[in-house]
Image (cartoon, rainbow, N blue to C red):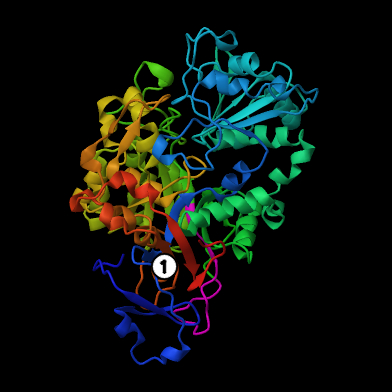
Amino acid sequence: MDERGTQAGAVSVDAHGRILKVGTEQEVVAGLDTRALTFVRLEPQQVLMPGFIEPHMHLLPTLLQALPVAHNLAPCLPPPYSGADTPHCQTELLKALMTLRPDASGGSESKEPIMGTNLDPSRQRLIPGLCGGAGAVSFLDLPKRYLADCVSQDRPVFIVDQSGHLAYANQQAFEVTCLDLTGKKECTPPASVTSSGGEWVKAGGEYTGLLREPAAFLPFFQALMKQRPSQALQTDPVRLVTQPGAEVRRTLQQLREAGLTTLADGGLMSPAELEAVKLLAERDDLPLRVTALLEYDLAYDAQTQRELLQPSGPACDPRTAPDCKLPKWLGASGIKLWVDGSTQGCTAQLAPPYRYKDTGHCKGAREGRSNYKSPREIADSLRGLWRTKGWRFQLHTNGNGAQQWAIDVFAELQREVVNPHPVLFIHQTVGSEEVTRKLASLREGTFVTSDGATVPRLDARVTHLIGHVAYWGDAFEHTLGAEARNLDPVGFERRHGIPFSLHSDSVVTPPRPLWLVEQAVTRRTWAYPDFKKSYVLGPEHAATVEEALRAITLEPARQHELDAWLGSIEPGKVADFVVLGANPLDYDPARGGDPTQLSRIPVIQTYLNGQPTAGGR
């Protein structure tokens, strides 16, 4: 995965886990006492690659999902991606809700809240007649009513959407939350909700039960978890990682079995979360490296203009410390801000040629929404941190309208103070060639602002949640129209020289890098609920196998400024490897291969610092 596309026969690694030489076996052992060497030989069909890097996921929620804290209501995955650990799933939305009924598991007198995760109205059908529903309105219009009819009228019900940007609550959940916040059964959202782009949606003067953005539903989660004392562990992230149960350990092992050696957590929101992820990375039994982003107001208090945290890196650097083995905790040196919401949740910020159709579950959403009033408000939130020149900045931009705002934000800040670090556009789902051109001009130093000023060169990059094509592509055709073919527009980025990576956004999609590679190369999508309809969405945006492999190795390393150590097999870097049961390049259609089989390549083993991690085959 180096710039030359090297394919070598052997690599040598020193006792500190650093790569010495790459070449033929004769070349790498030249001058060494072979009696003092340990040889590891691959089987003829096997290949060694740099360890896979997940550039954007949410580690603590991924671990929480493995616990019996909430029912997983996720729709099924298409057949190529249905792994042995795929949970039971429901493709009909109201039937999925009915599985949460207290009597669905034999009856219960408990008054504890009923909680669920990963409901997805964009793919789960709303069947008329179930739960007393006429089906005349979308689920997003009146979730409170459906939760009462399908689940419970006397117990609090709270469900987080699979997008992570929406949640649904019944009347009892509102009452418990308001009692916790104000001591009364009725209340308005606290300032912490509205100041961060959250919304408790109303219609006709009443709350509908729809909650937009994490800031809106965090008070519900906190209040309802207090009603579940048996689940106290779930509200304490430090305890979660220092006292991991079998489910947490199994989830971590599955990440390793997928070939991952490094994870980037996509946005920690509290000091406790930061401490928990750091402690998790430092555990002896964790076979993964971890770096993290901080949600911007965790690192910087905009109200007091006071910096709270400084960027951090690994405890030692193998390049400068001869005895250093690269630590597993790689530090937190990135800043994350959400410009908009979810494309499938109808809250992505759109601009021409896009708008949500006036039919289907996004009816009335039109151009979606931003979490901020203007690009200037975003720039004001980030300015103090930007001027330190110490942080990387990564903005969540699903819609092309949000992408344009983010470009304006970065242009304004870079014009004021030149920041040498890469900036990242996260998801970049709804594609527009005009946006891609502007990104290219930022990279080239030719971007011109509305008042005629030229912005100094900025290292702008993108990362794609490629599962938007595989799992939601057909749904997006119904909500966005023919322009949905430009989701995750690799073809535009190739044309204009924009580097891209691929990520899972777990828990939104499974963190399986070879699945991401296949999805990017084939761009196959499926129609829910029965998968009988499958087709290629936007073939002009298909990645080559080599591009997709770089997008899970070298490119994410560069985006997180880890490429001095990780991302390719080159002398001086760290020996983090994955052994695969076949060569992915052989599956490239340009070589006569079948890319629909990429996800079936077995992961044999992973290595950190040249040492095999636990549980190899």
Judging from the image, what secondary structure is the residue with disc 1 in? loop
Q: Is residue 24 above or below residue 368?
A: below
Q: How many marks?
A: 1
Horizontal side, residue 199 vs residue 531: left or right: right
Q: Can residue 299 be seen from the camera position used here? A: no
Q: Position of residue 15 (x, y in %)?
A: 50, 82
Question: What secondary structure characterizes most of the magenta part?
Answer: loop
Would you place residue 269 above or below residue 113 in this image? below
Please give left or right for residue 360 compared with residue 491 in the image: right
Q: Sort mark 1 into few (<14), some (14-19) or many (20+) by Cα contacts within 10 Å.
A: many
291 up-or-down from 494: above or below: below
Observer-nearest residue: 187 or 208?
208
User: Is residue 338 magenta-colored?
Assistant: no
Give the residue type at disc 1: Leu
Residue occupying image coordinates x 75% and y 27%: 179
Q: List x then y, in percent, for residue 233.
A: 73, 46
Locate the N terminus by quadrant: bottom left
Residue 602, position in %: x, y? 42, 54
Q: Quadrant of residue 238?
A: bottom right
Measured as percent of width and height from the top left, residue 461 is found at: 33, 53
Q: Nearer the viewer, residue 388 or 118?
A: 118
Q: Which residue is mark 1?
A: 566
The quadrant in which residue 271 appears is bottom right
Task: State which region is magenta.
Answer: 315-335
Above or below, 607 against 555 in this view is below
